[in-house]
Amino acid sequence: MMLADILAQLQKQAQSGESGVAAAFELNWQSLEPEAQKLACLLSLFALAPIPWSLVESAASYGDLEFDLKDNCTVLVERYLLQELAEDTYQIHERIRELLQQKLEDLAEADELKRGFCQTMVAVAKDIPETPTLIEIAKVTLAIPHLGETATVYQAWLSDNDLIWPFVGLARFYQGQGAYVQALPWREQCLSSARKRFGDEHPDVATSLNNLAFLYNSQGRYSDAEPLLIEALAMTKRLLGDEHPDVATSLNNLAALYNSQGRYSDAEPLLIEALAMTKRLLGDEHLDVATSLNNLALLYDSQGRYSDVEPLLIEALAMRKRLLGDEHPDVASNLNNLAFLYDSQGRYSDAEPLYIEALAMRKRLLGDEHPDVATSLNNLAFLYDSQGRYSDAEPLYIEALAMRKRLLGDEHPDVASSLNNLALLYKSQGRYSDAEPLYIEALAIAEKRLGANHPNTITFRKNLEYLRRNRQPLFRRMVAFVSRWFQ
């Protein structure tokens, strides 16, 4: 149909009172070949956001569209049904999308296209790691709105095996960047969706419980995390038996929570059991083994058992480098933890280069604004403080505190740790009026979030009491906030 013919028909329909947009769309639609119509319907499944062409190609492949996609894409652009934003990036107008979705429902292949779209987005979700780097974030950012569309609109076309993956991917994208508020609804919806489809007793329900608890732990919401982890562990044992990698993971996660709560005697047997089971089931050279070694080391460090800590951390670091390479967020975490051990032992010359390497790696991989970067800044500052290098320590403490408040909120346990550490610095300099309000704020947060009898709360309380009595040196103890908690 020629443009003049379309305009003539539009004029007639406009005179009869029909919607101009709908009429123009219908004329365009009637003039399209069936292949272009199918491609337009596929495109209507994507969110109202830029659409990378690679996702369209993948969805078309899953949906068994075997015609020339690019030629038909050009036709859709020429007919004003699709806008080209940049090379290989497109978008559909909201009203055109609505009209295309109406056409989609009349298409015989509608369900097939929806399943293909979902399979494409599940593949994207599975590629998002626990802690995405800047490169990985950039690679997947344009897909995030479409992943959200999969989770919220097209659940019915997700297979049972794929149901939770869009939620998992979205939560990892945000949680891995420290954006816990944005991650929370996806973790919650994942659990509710799994329960709705599978009931209360299913491995994906247990996984969803575990993942939500993982987020709560990152937020310092330990009392909210514990019942979920206990439920997940019991369910996993019932469904999979006592000897399964998922059971080892649940044991490890519950133990890590107990360590965060200062319940060291409860944590240790779980970590030892998890490590032994993981080695039996997965062998000695596996990332889950490295995780168990790291977490057991952090528990021993919290207890001051330094001679037990070092060989575990060195083994975990070497294994992660072999399996992940030298440049990875988990390698940076291990470097940080080993430096923390050396710092605790007064081995400052051994600790400093590791802290600096971990900080630089985290900035390269995760960006300047990330909770792990704040941890590295805080730890390096503590090292300088311990050496009496107060002018080097203070700006790092202040930067870490400000970053933690921005990223984690004003009442996170890590904020309390930063307040306490900065107060210690001021006390060491005799700046008592600067130190006291920080101690008071740190203690208030700890009592509210950790409880009156948590080891960190007791430490903060003692520091404040010592300051006020002004008798003896403050009890200097770095709060064990550097531990990492893994699924």
Image: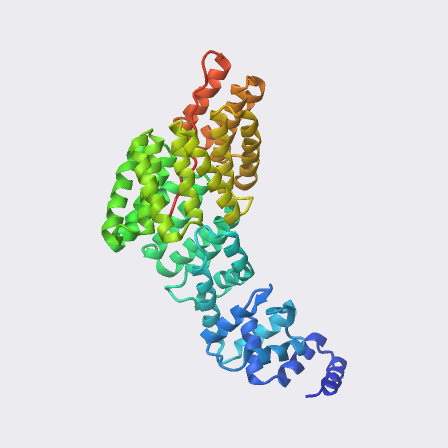
**Quarter of the figure with residue 12:** bottom right
Outermost front residue: 349
Residue 150 in percent (x, y) is at: 49, 63
Q: Nearer the viewer, residue 322 or 422?
A: 322
Q: Nearer the viewer, residue 221 or 120?
A: 120
Residue 299 in percent (x, y) is at: 33, 35
Q: Is residue 162 above or below residue 415?
A: below
Residue found 40% across the figure and 63% down from its top: 162
Residue found 52% across the figure and 24% down from its top: 425
Residue 119 in percent (x, y) is at: 44, 68
Q: Is residue 243 visible?
A: no
Q: Is residue 186 above or below residue 460?
A: below
Residue 202 in percent (x, y) is at: 32, 57
Horizontal side of residue 345 vs 367, given as left or right? left
Horizontal side of residue 391 vs 229, given as left or right? right
Residue found 45% across the figure and 28% down from its top: 447
Q: Is residue 267 above or below residue 364?
A: above
Q: Nearer the viewer, residue 148 or 390?
A: 390
**Quarter of the figure with residue 459:** top left
Horizontal side of residue 305 vs 383, given as left or right? left
- Which image quarter is the N terminus in? bottom right
Residue found 53% across the figure and 71% down from its top: 56
**Quarter of the figure with residue 437:** top right
